[in-house]
Amino acid sequence: MRLIIYAVAIYIFYILLKRALFSSGTRSRSTGERGGGGGGGGGEKSGGFNAAEETVQDPVCKTFLLKENAPSHTDSRGTHYFCGNDCLEKYKNGG
């Protein structure tokens, strides 16, 4: 009888350990948020790439950047986003 109780206890410990190690890691990678632990949790961004943020390509230097932080310019060809003011000025001047 003791052997069965020990086996069940070990199995439950194994399942809990497996969930603690592997379930929080996959969530962190897919959402760009920190898991529990020392990071504070609570939906803090880790500074990595968040898949929900849209990226655009600078038409001058071809750098990919986050749309929300990029300077933009709208003309007859549409709205374009730039990595910085230097590329924006080059675009406006035809370069």
Image: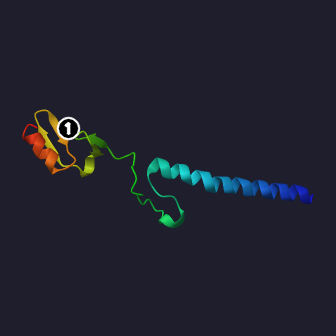
Disc 1 residue type (three-letter): Pro
Quarter-wise, where is residue 17 in the image?
bottom right
Image height check: is 54 above or below 35? above
Disc count in the image? 1
Quadrant into which the N terminus falls? bottom right
* Left or right side of 12 for 64: left
Q: Residue at x 56, y 54 (%)?
A: 24
Q: Which residue is mark 1?
A: 59
Q: Which of the 4 quarters of the picture holds residue 54?
A: top left
- In the displayed structure, does residue 93 sit left or right of residue 25? left
Residue 4 percent coordinates (x, y): 88, 55
- Foreground pick, 34 / 91: 91
The residue under the point 45% across, 50% down is 31
Element at label 1: loop
Query: Which residue is drawn at the image coordinates 81% and 55% (left, top)?
Result: 8
Q: Nearer the viewer, residue 95 or 71?
A: 95
